[in-house]
């Protein structure tokens, strides 16, 4: 009796062919996995390791394992938090402006009947220009000697004051990446069937209601992806600030601070700590967005109310 | 509830294409009217113009006597069911059906009551909290209907609502659409390319061809008295047989031999001033196996010919016998268009024209053997090949 009962509990044995196939699968994945480990995992692990040490290239002999002391030093430092605040402000403001402008552009491009290809190409020009080049053109447009825009608005050396500098940095960011946002959003717009909008207008929705109640919810996944990309990108802002202000007058971003410590200050320990903190911040942003995706399976609200 | 009047309504696209040309249709309050025609005949354009989704180029559209040409769709108080159903994917069935009411700022209790009532009528009560993606085709179709009926609009517009369903479900839904319309007694305009749907559903049918109204009438009237070759060929399944013929003294000469026309037909043809060369049209059911008939009656009321049965299809209730008729085929622009639409234009290959006859099930016809066949001379329709006009039209 007992040996009959034993039968079903034994693990299903893979056939010879199945096992060979599984081994082949692992072998085929291996090169890609190894490359991934070498170029992604190793630098991350190495910088985490560096962040746990006192390691200043000016004093190489003082190299010493200090545990979390670097983190304590960075997180209790006012400069870091100023940079963090500046980065957050730039990220939030520029991404919000980009979303609104990008949506308008996407709608315009979607509706354009004549010269659609030309309109799209023209829109994409800012995104095609190298960031540093674009940043230099903004720099010369706003600086005190050659600044035609500064002259136009009667601003005196705006890049030497904090708030105007931040506004110009945001302007440069928005100008550069709105086309990218528009392109992603336009792909989302293509997901909204015409019949749905026609049905909504038959159901009595005006243009704004069609946009907010049908178009936005249907293209929500595309919007979230666009926002995620742009938020992650904006949080790591570096080139524009580097060219426009070099971080003067408290306009440094966290990436700027990291660069100053790591490359200019040659302090590998503190620099690595900062880059690990940026990595963690970016991971948190990504996690929040992905969780948002999960939580936002369209229309979870019962009763037809929103 | 409303009367819808199309007064010389035309639609011309910016590229100059004329989609609808001077359509004159009066749709009575509570009427179920079908717009039917082959693809590209302008039936959907006409529906969209009534809905307000497309501008009217010329003419006037009146709902309840009021000109609505310039009104936005939302101000016309008309509901529409789309071929794709166009359900909002992010809303549950309940939210989908409630959407028009929410937009109209109806209070919560009323919304709940109306949605529940519509769901009960359409048998959707147990699906109210599901998403459209989790519903079957038939259920989605019913949700689309539900969204239309919840707010008691002046009229329903339906754009081929059943064409995405499989054949069996389509027949089932056809009856329920018909029942629902009778129950609600709301003016309904229904677009289809399927003549069976047109025949079975509508109080009246409008046959369209390249933007022009061909004929408006009850299904039976259209079947018995088609105004022209196009309507004759489009309405009826299997379709009417067309043969070239020559009119003589009270006689019609076709490939089936000479036919003495009945007095009624002769008077109509004479009154219409028929040309010599005509096209004769005979419906499949107006043929019969001579062996089953009283010989005397057969000789008096019609004409007899002998031909070899090519194919015999026994449907249980009837037998369809197919013959090949030697000689040229009837040719006209209308018939070419019908053939192109049904896809029979490319199958060609058989010389002569095919004749479809519906015989009694007791007939002893056998494939490959000759059979004596009678047809009713009083039911022969005569068409002018150049204009397509029905010369025996009694309307």
Image (tube, coloured by chain):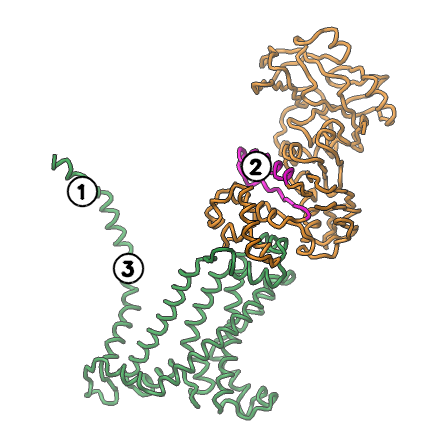
Chain colours: A green, B orange
Frontmost of labels 1 and 2 is 2
Q: CA distance from mark 1 to mark 2?
A: 51 Å
Q: Secondary structure at mark 3?
A: helix
Q: Residues within 10 Å of mark 1 (few under 14, many from 20)?
A: few
The residue sitting at the front extreme is B109
The 10 Å Cα crowd at callout 2, few under 14, some 14 to 19, many 20 or more, is some
Subunit ID for the residue under disc 2 = B
The residue at which mark 2 appears reads as B173
Residue B375 lies, in percent from the top left, at: 72, 16
Chain of the residue under the numbered disc 3 shown in the image: A
Visible residue check, residue B84? no
Can you tell which quarter of the image residue B369 is in?
top right
Query: Percent from the top left, x then y, of residue B267?
Result: 86, 21
Nearer to us in this view, A142 or B193: B193
Please, which chain is the residue tagged with disc 1 on?
A
Q: Secondary structure at mark 2?
A: helix
Name the residue beneath numbered marker 1: A9
Q: Nearer the viewer, mark 3 or mark 1?
A: 1
Residue B168 or residue B226, whichever sits in front: B168
Vertical side of A224 occupied by A234: above or below: below
Which residue range is magenta in the image?
B154-183
Q: Residue at x 67, y 40 (%)?
A: B185
Q: Indicate the quadrant where residue A83 lies.
A: bottom left
Give the residue number, with chain letter if any, for mark 3: A31
Give the mark nearest the N terminus, 3 or 1.
1
Q: Quadrant of the N terminus of chain A?
A: top left
């Amino acid at each position: 009796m007992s040996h009959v009962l034993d039968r079903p509990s034994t693990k299903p044995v893979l056939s010879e062919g199945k096992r060979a196939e599984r081994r082949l699968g692992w072998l085929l994945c291996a090169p890609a996995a190894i490359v991934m480990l070498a170029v992604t995992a190793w630098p991350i692990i190495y910088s985490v390791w560096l962040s746990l040490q006192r390691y200043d290239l000016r004093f190489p002999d003082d190299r010493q394992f200090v545990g979390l002391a670097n983190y304590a030093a960075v997180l209790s430092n006012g400069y870091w938090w100023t940079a963090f605040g500046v980065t957050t402000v730039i990220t939030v403001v520029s991404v919000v402006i980009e979303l609104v402008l990008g949506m308008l552009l996407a709608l315009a491009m979607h509706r354009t009947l004549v010269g659609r290809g030309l309109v799209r190409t023209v829109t994409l020009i800012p995104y095609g220009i190298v960031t540093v080049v674009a940043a230099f053109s903004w720099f010369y447009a706003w600086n005190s000697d050659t600044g035609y825009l500064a002259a136009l608005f009667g601003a005196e050396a705006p890049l030497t004051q904090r708030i105007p500098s931040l506004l110009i940095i945001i302007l440069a960011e928005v100008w550069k990446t709105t086309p990218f946002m528009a392109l992603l959003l336009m792909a989302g717009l293509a997901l909204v069937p015409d019949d749905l909008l026609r049905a909504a207008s038959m159901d009595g929705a005006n243009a704004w209601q069609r946009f907010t109640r049908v178009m936005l919810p249907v293209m929500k996944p595309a919007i979230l992806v666009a926002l995620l990309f742009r938020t992650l990108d904006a949080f790591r802002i570096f080139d524009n600030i580097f060219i426009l202000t070099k971080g003067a007058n408290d306009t440094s971003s966290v990436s700027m601070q990291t660069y100053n410590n790591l490359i200019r200050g040659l302090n590998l320990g503190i620099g690595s700590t900062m880059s690990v903190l940026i990595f963690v911040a970016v991971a948190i942003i990504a996690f929040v967005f992905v969780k948002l995706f999960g939580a936002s399976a369209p229309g979870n609200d019962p009763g037809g109310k929103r | 509830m409303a009367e819808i009047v199309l007064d010389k309504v035309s639609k011309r696209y910016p590229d100059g294409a004329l989609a609808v040309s001077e359509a004159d249709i009066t749709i009575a309050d509570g009427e179920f009217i079908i717009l039917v025609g082959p693809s590209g005949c302008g039936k959907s354009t006409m529906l969209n113009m009534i809905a307000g989704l497309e501008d009217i180029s010329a003419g006037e559209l009146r709902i309840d006597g009021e000109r609505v040409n310039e009104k936005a769709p939302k101000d016309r108080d008309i509901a529409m069911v789309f071929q794709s159903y166009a359900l909002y994917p992010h809303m549950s069935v309940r939210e989908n059906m409630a959407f028009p009411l929410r937009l109209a700022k109806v209070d919560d209790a009323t919304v709940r009551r109306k949605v529940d009532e519509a769901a009960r009528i359409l048998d959707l009560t147990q699906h109210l909290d599901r998403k459209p993606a989790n519903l079957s085709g038939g259920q989605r179709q019913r949700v689309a209907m539900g969204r239309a009926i919840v707010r008691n609009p002046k009229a329903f517009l339906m754009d081929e609502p059943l064409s995405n369903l499989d054949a069996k479900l389509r027949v089932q839904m056809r009856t329920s659409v018909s029942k629902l319309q009778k129950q609600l007694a709301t003016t309904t305009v229904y677009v289809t390319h399927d003549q069976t749907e047109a025949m079975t559903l509508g109080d009246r049918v409008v046959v369209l061809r390249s933007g022009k109204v061909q004929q408006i009438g009850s299904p039976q009237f259209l079947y018995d008295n088609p105004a022209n070759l196009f309507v004759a060929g489009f309405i009826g399944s299997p379709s009417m047989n067309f043969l070239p013929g020559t009119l003589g003294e009270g006689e019609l000469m076709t490939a089936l031999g000479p036919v003495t026309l009945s007095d009624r037909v002769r008077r109509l043809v004479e009154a219409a001033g028929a040309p010599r060369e005509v096209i004769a049209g005979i419906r499949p059911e107006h043929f019969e196996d001579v062996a089953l008939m009283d010989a005397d009656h057969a000789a008096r009321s019609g004409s007899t010919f002998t031909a070899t049965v090519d194919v015999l299809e026994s449907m249980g209730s009837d037998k369809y016998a197919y013959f090949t008729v030697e000689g040229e085929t009837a040719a006209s622009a209308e018939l070419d268009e019908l053939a192109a639409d049904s896809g029979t234009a490319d199958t060609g290959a058989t010389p002569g024209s095919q004749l479809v006859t519906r015989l009694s099930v007791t007939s002893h016809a056998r494939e490959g053997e000759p059979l004596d066949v009678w047809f009713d001379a009083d039911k022969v329709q005569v068409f002018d090949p150049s204009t397509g006009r029905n010369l025996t039209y009694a309307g």
